[in-house]
Amino acid sequence: MIEQLAELISSCGVGEVADNANQIYKHAADKLWSLFTAARKLNKMIGENVVSDDLMVSAIGGGHSFDGEHMEDTYGQGGVKPTQHAVICTTDLGLCEMDGPRAGKVLLKPKVALHNL
């Protein structure tokens, strides 16, 4: 940020970039750190860089047929399982996007325990 401020000041016709950067660092570096800290706190307060309610947890109810595109077998070797396996329960919750251009996109598949039929 110091470099960017130095470039801005220089583009206004005041000094060279390197000299401006040295002066800013010499006189204001400690104050800039408190500015960064305050900006980060503000970002958290207004929801920036924080997971918000645009995500939804997902779980699979017992009795559903296994679908490898939407869930993972907790105890299996991975990959798509045949549909003759029924879900007993969800062991790990999944995450889906609720809003925006990718609404409904599965970000993290729920993990399920399967029963062989």
Image: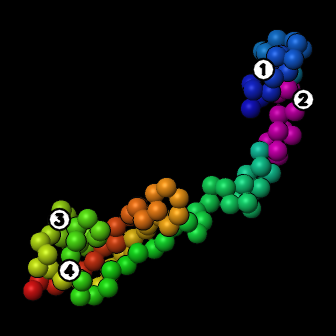
Residue type beneath disc 3: Val
N-terminal label among 3 and 4: 4
For label 3, the residue is 80
Answer with left or right where residue 48 lies relative to residue 93.
Answer: right
Image position of 53 with respect to 38: above or below: below
Kindly indicate the quadrant of the structure image that contains residue 57: bottom left
| SS assignment at label 3 | loop
N-terminal label among 2 and 4: 2
**Numbered range of the magenta stretch:** 24-35
Residue type beneath disc 1: Glu
Tag 3–tag 4 contact (CB < 8 Å)? no
Of marks 1 and 4, the one in the foreground: 4
Of marks 3 and 4, the one in the foreground: 4
Q: Residue 27, which numbered label?
A: 2
Kindly indicate the quadrant of the structure image that contains residue 77: bottom left
For label 4, the residue is 65
The answer to whether residue 90 of the structure is visible from this angle is yes
Residue closer to the observer: 101 or 112: 101
Residue type beneath disc 4: Ser
Residue sitting at the far front? 101
The residue carrying pointer 4 sits among few (fewer than 14), some (14 to 19) or many (20 or more) residues within 10 Å by Cα, namely: some
Identify the residue at horizontal 90%, vertical 29% (top origin): 27
Identify the residue at horizontal 80%, vertical 27% (top origin): 5
Identify the residue at horizontal 28%, vertical 70% (top origin): 71
